[in-house]
Image: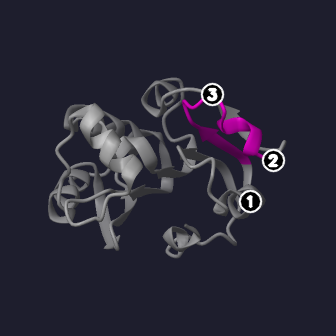
Amino acid sequence: FSEILTKVDLSKDFDRIVVSDSIDNTFLSDLSRSAKQLIVVDPRSDAYEKLDANVDARKQEINEFLEGLEESSVDLIVLSGIIAFFDLDLKLEIFDKCSKLLSKDGILVFVAVTANSKLTADQKVAEEIFDTRILSSASYEKVVGQYFNEVETANSVFYCKNSYGDSK
């Protein structure tokens, strides 16, 4: 999972990093060394037993958590997991919030499940439960491009530079 952060300079000091649904990923220790505050947001009740004590863990849905943050207050947001199965309107709302929450040089890293992704058994269940239509990489690129000036894609991971306040 750490390969998703290859386009993020982890030698930089981040004030605040927000990560969704990634409790079980090993890259969290790398992120915690790069951030003054690392916040992991995950609605699963058993997820927090796996985290280091220095990680700020929130048992909450990511869209609800983002509501409470101030604009331009986050340097890096990593979205993965269940967000891929939210309906399109909710994803658009989350992308809009992220574009406003990111600092001037902030980055959104969105780990997408795309139409050409091979789904795991858990992802197939989530697709059925949420009755989700999985988008293609090209569609995601268009969607996130509505909120960010720069979008770079590598293996269904989208790196989006903050465009809030810039003219598009």
Marks 2 and 3: in contact by CB < 8 Å?
no
Q: Position of residue 120 (x, y in %)?
A: 38, 57
Label at residue 156: none
User: Circle 2: is it few (<14), some (14-19), or many (20+) Cα within 10 Å?
Assistant: few
Q: CA distance from mark 1 to mark 3?
A: 21 Å
Q: What SS does tag 2 mark? A: loop
Q: CA distance from mark 3 to mark 2?
A: 16 Å
Tally of numbered discs: 3
User: Circle 3: is it few (<14), some (14-19), or many (20+) Cα within 10 Å?
Assistant: few
User: Circle 1: is it few (<14), some (14-19), or many (20+) Cα within 10 Å?
Assistant: some
Residue assigned mark 2: 52
Q: Residue at x 58, y 69 (%)?
A: 2
Q: Is residue 47 magenta?
A: yes
Where is the C terminus found, in terms of image quarters? Answer: bottom left
Residue assigned mark 1: 29
1 or 3: mark nearer the eye: 3
Amino acid type, label 1? Ser
Residue 90 lies left or right of residue 160; in this view the side is: left
- Quadrant of residue 33 within the rendered picture: bottom right
Q: What SS does tag 3 mark? A: loop
Numbered range of the magenta stretch? 37-51
Q: Residue at x 67, y 68 (%)?
A: 12
State whether residue 18 is above or below residue 120. Answer: above
State whether residue 149 is above or below residue 122. Answer: below
Q: CA distance from mark 1 to mark 2?
A: 8 Å
Q: Residue at x 63, y 41 (%)?
A: 40
State whether residue 86 is above or below residue 19. Answer: above
Where is the N terminus found, in terms of image quarters? Answer: bottom right
First in sequence: mark 3 or mark 2?
Answer: 3
Q: Position of residue 92 (x, y in %)?
A: 25, 39
Residue assigned mark 3: 45
3 or 2: mark nearer the eye: 3
